[in-house]
Image (cartoon, helix red, strand yellow):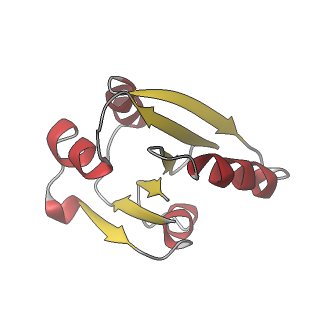
């Protein structure tokens, strides 16, 4: 797993609604007791070709997106959410997209296989 970590604040509703314009969406709701189990189901679903995930600060859900076309996460961030290069960064560390959100150091992480 790797991720695109968004450091600029975005309204969660705007993030979700923008992604839903181009993708089918499924969410995985968790609480403090079942987060690990739900995360494993989410990660398993991300193994499907062409999908990507989203994890946001202060939202107890993981989101799975299946694009209707060949939309890439980078294209979603730059062309549709109008983020600049300094508003997000790419991480090759599988844990970082989750850790930075849990620590409150980023606003959202898009996760890819």
Residue found at the very far right of the displayed protein: 33
Pick the residue in front: 107 or 44.
44
Query: What percent of the width, then of the height, locates residue 31?
Result: 77, 46
- The answer to whether residue 24 is above or below residue 81 is above
Identify the residue shown where x is 32% and y is 49%.
Answer: 73
Identify the residue shown where x is 26% and y is 42%.
Answer: 76
Residue found at the very far front of the displayed protein: 49
Query: What percent of the width, then of the height, locates residue 25?
Result: 51, 29
- The answer to whether residue 28 is above or below residue 13 is below
- The answer to whether residue 55 is above or below residue 17 is below
* Picture mark count: 0
Pick the residue in front: 13 or 24.
24
Identify the residue shown where x is 36% and y is 60%.
Answer: 4
Identify the residue shown where x is 74% and y is 43%.
Answer: 30
Query: What percent of the width, then of the height, locates residue 52?
Result: 46, 47
Q: Is residue 15 left or right of residue 99?
A: left
Query: What percent of the width, then of the height, locates residue 74?
Result: 25, 52
Pick the residue in front: 45 or 19.
45
Q: Is residue 11 left or right of residue 112?
A: left
Q: Is residue 40 left or right of residue 82?
A: right
């Amino acid at each position: 797993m790797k991720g695109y970590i968004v450091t600029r604040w975005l309204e969660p509703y705007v993030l979700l609604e923008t992604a839903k314009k181009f993708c089918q969406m499924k969410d995985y709701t968790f609480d403090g007791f079942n987060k690990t189990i739900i995360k494993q189901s989410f990660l398993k679903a991300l193994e499907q070709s062409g999908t990507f995930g989203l994890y946001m600060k202060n939202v107890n859900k993981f989101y799975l997106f299946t694009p209707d076309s060949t939309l890439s996460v980078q294209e979603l961030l730059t062309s549709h959410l109008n983020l600049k290069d300094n508003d997000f960064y790419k991480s090759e560390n599988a844990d970082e997209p989750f850790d930075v959100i849990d620590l409150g150091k980023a606003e959202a992480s898009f996760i890819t296989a």
